[in-house]
Image (spheres, rainbow, N blue to C red):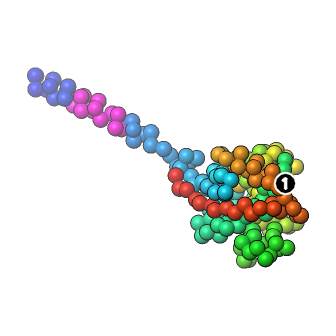
């Protein structure tokens, strides 16, 4: 009897001691927002962190991540900045100082994304893909909205948002600029993808 009672108590103690381990296993983070990749855009004026919207724009997110991992964006500039509206970058033509007349016209060879217009509003901080007049013409150029711009909703594909560093976007947006809203001073970027 004593042996059976001691055995039961011992089993309960062991199970009780292990239950925090089981509970810890139950609380492991699930694949989701905290584990999804995000981007860090580094410039000479600071860094911006971008969280993606893969649920509403999976192909645009995949495209941006793929280009960033290949180093495509590194050395490109924010070539169009409009205070109170947005900053635009991601054109490979901007790596060449002699192609200023072609800034805003470049992209990856042959790559055109099908539009993924969605319900995400173009509020301050949203990252969206630039395109030409055709809805399915996005390639690599993107813009960050510095002021709510709902007139862009369902016209451009929102695929992420700035979660840290909006003051950097504001500083870029207020940079002195010349013709075609091109900043007078180059603001190059390096884009890194961080897997969480």
Q: Is residue 32 magenta?
A: no
Q: Which residues are magenta?
A: 11-22
In the rendered image, is residue 97 in sight? yes
Q: Position of residue 87 (x, y in %)?
A: 78, 55
Q: What residue lies at 84% left-to-right and 54% top-to-bottom?
A: 82
Near-viewer residue (94 or 85): 94
Q: What residue lies at 19% left-to-right and 29% top-to-bottom?
A: 10
Q: Is residue 170 above or below residue 141?
A: above
In-image side of 183 versus 50 (left or right): right
Q: Badge 1 local density, few (<14 within 10 Å), some, or many (20+)?
A: many
In-image side of 71 versus 167 (left or right): left
Q: What residue lies at 50% left-to-right and 46% top-to-bottom?
A: 30
* SS type, badge 1: strand
Quadrant where the N terminus is found in the figure:
top left
Q: Is residue 150 above or below residue 58?
A: above
Q: What residue lies at 64% left-to-right and 67% top-to-bottom?
A: 74
Magenta stretch secondary structure, dominant: helix
In-image side of 11 versus 93 (left or right): left
Q: Position of residue 166 (x, y in %)?
A: 71, 46
Near-viewer residue (77 or 146): 77
Q: Position of residue 55 (x, y in %)?
A: 66, 52
In the rendered image, is residue 121 in sight? no
Q: Position of residue 165 (x, y in %)?
A: 67, 47
**Which residue is labeled 1 in the image?**
82
Image quarter of residue 89: bottom right
Q: Is residue 20 magenta?
A: yes
Image quarter of residue 124: top right
């Amino acid at each position: 009897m004593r042996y059976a009672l001691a055995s039961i108590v011992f089993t309960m103690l062991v199970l009780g001691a292990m239950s925090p381990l089981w509970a810890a296993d139950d609380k492991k983070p699930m694949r989701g927002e905290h584990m999804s990749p995000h981007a860090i855009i580094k410039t000479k004026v600071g860094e911006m962190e971008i969280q993606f919207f893969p649920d509403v724009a999976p192909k645009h997110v995949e495209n941006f991540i793929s280009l960033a991992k290949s180093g495509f964006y590194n050395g490109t500039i924010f070539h169009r900045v409009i205070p109170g509206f947005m900053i635009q970058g991601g054109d490979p033509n901007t790596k060449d100082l002699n192609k200023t007349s072609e800034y805003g016209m470049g992209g990856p060879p042959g790559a055109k994304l099908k539009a993924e217009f969605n319900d995400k509003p173009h509020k301050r901080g949203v990252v969206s893909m630039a395109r030409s007049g055709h809805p399915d013409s996005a390639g690599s150029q993107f813009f960050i909205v510095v002021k709510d711009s709902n007139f862009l909703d369902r016209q451009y594909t929102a695929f992420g948002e700035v979660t840290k560093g909006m003051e950097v976007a504001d500083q870029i947006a207020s940079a002195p600029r010349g013709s075609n809203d091109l900043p007078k001073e180059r603001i190059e970027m390096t884009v890194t993808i961080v897997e969480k």
